[in-house]
Amino acid sequence: MRIIIPIVSFGKGGGNRVLSELSNSWIDAGVEVIFICFGNSEDPYFKTNAKIIWIDYNGNQLDDSTFRIRNKENLVRRVIALTKALNRYTLDGDIVLANEAVTAYPVSFMKRKAKKVYYIQADEADYSFFYSSLKSKLMGLISYLTYYLPLIRVVNSPLYYRYNNIRSKFYIPPGMDFEKFRPNDTPKEMTPFIIGCIGRFEKFKGTADVLQAFKLLVDSGYNVILKVAYGDNSSIEEKYLDKIEVIIPKNDIELGYFYRSLNVLISTGLVQHYAHHYPVMEAMACEIPTITTGYLPATKANSWLVGPNSPSCIMKSVKFLYDINNQAIVEEKISLAYKEVQAYGWPTVSREFLEILKEV
């Protein structure tokens, strides 16, 4: 079996991590995996053992990844170049795996008699339609239409079996590396109480609600610190600055350190609730309690669920965790969360995905 994965670039996002981890596991299982990527991408942030074919905007293979071109954001040129490359470097019978809207079109348009699969890790159209700008609406429409393309759709959460115009028969969750995301060797101190979140600039990620809840706690006299991974504090009022720490993890090992330094991880996005969400999964694997608007694998039994746009509810949940009298309940939920997240190990996830690919 040979799996071809066309991508626009290698980045630091969770979707890129998934592709790298899957490729490594599939190679270990004896499968040949090849990425086709534009040469103006950076080298893979997440290590992959797969072969990489670097291409230019004519779809021709390059000797290395030093290719540079102006207007690199031209979507049409990207689609045409990837389509040409797929027809050149793919064999009949290969499995070609689209992984985002930009790559779904070339996979659909290619003439090779390959098995065309679309791994949907989120409803990209939903994210784009969240904003009012014309560019966002256009990207939303482009993403929306990909779900009608003649591709075999595999989704990463049960939510997407039937979500908006997404329809799928196959589901594979994201995976976890439990060597990088693991519990603390010693118990966490409760003072000061450290709140953590992933500082994403997109409004629908809900970071603003975490910040507002933190301010409410500080103003109420609670000894709390806010740690923000990948964020900044440039817009924070001066009176809160000494209680906010911005962390920029360089890799997943450092990201694991970030989670283990927390007393609670808060992930309160505003859209696509009950999809899998890496911060929630990673915190659970580190035995850190989670407050979330309902991202899997969080449930009422293993986490603290709050509604969207509800800083006061976030504050109430933090106060519950802060109270030493509630620690028996807290420990019970943490233990259950840790037990349930163990189902997401990469060996299990990649093997199940491979079985689906063999079936199709």
Image (tube, rainbow, N blue to C red):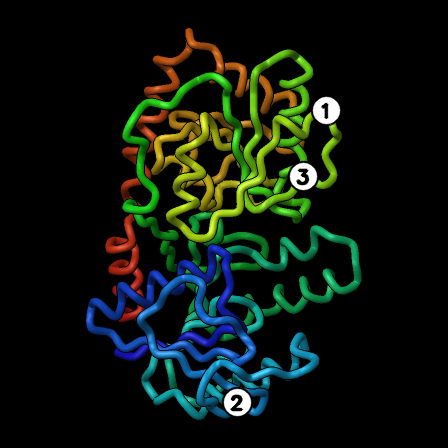
Q: Residue at x 45, y 84 (%)?
A: 64
Image vertical order of residue 245 relative to residue 126, above or below? above
Q: Is residue 86 visible?
A: yes
Q: Choose mark 2 or mark 1, whichever is in front.
A: 1
Mark linked to residue 58: none
Image check: 183 left or right of 265? left
Q: Is residue 108 visible?
A: no
Q: Quadrant of the N terminus?
A: bottom left
Q: Residue at x 72, y 61 (%)?
A: 136
Q: Residue at x 67, y 23 (%)?
A: 215
Instruction: Quadrant for residue 23, please give it.
Output: bottom left
Question: Which comes before the other along the chain, label 3 or label 2?
Answer: 2
Direction top: furthest residue: 325
Cα separation, mark 3 vs mark 2, equals 42 Å
In the picture of the structure, the residue carrying the numbered disc 2 is 59
Cα separation, mark 3 vs mark 1, equals 12 Å
Image vertical order of residue 163 relative to residue 22, above or below? above
Could you say which is closer to the camera, residue 279 or residue 70? 70
Instruction: Name the kind of residue labelled 3 in the image.
Output: Asn
Image check: 273 left or right of 179? right
Mark linked to residue 239: 1
In the picture of the structure, the residue carrying the numbered disc 3 is 233
Tag 2, which secondary structure?
loop
Tag 1, which secondary structure?
helix
Instruction: Quadrant for residue 296, please give it.
Output: top left
Q: Residue at x 67, y 36 (%)?
A: 208
- Crowding around mark 2 (Cα neighbors within 10 Å: few <14, some 14 to 19, many 20+) is many
Q: Choose mark 3 or mark 2, whichever is in front.
A: 3
Image vertical order of residue 54 relative to residue 307, above or below? below
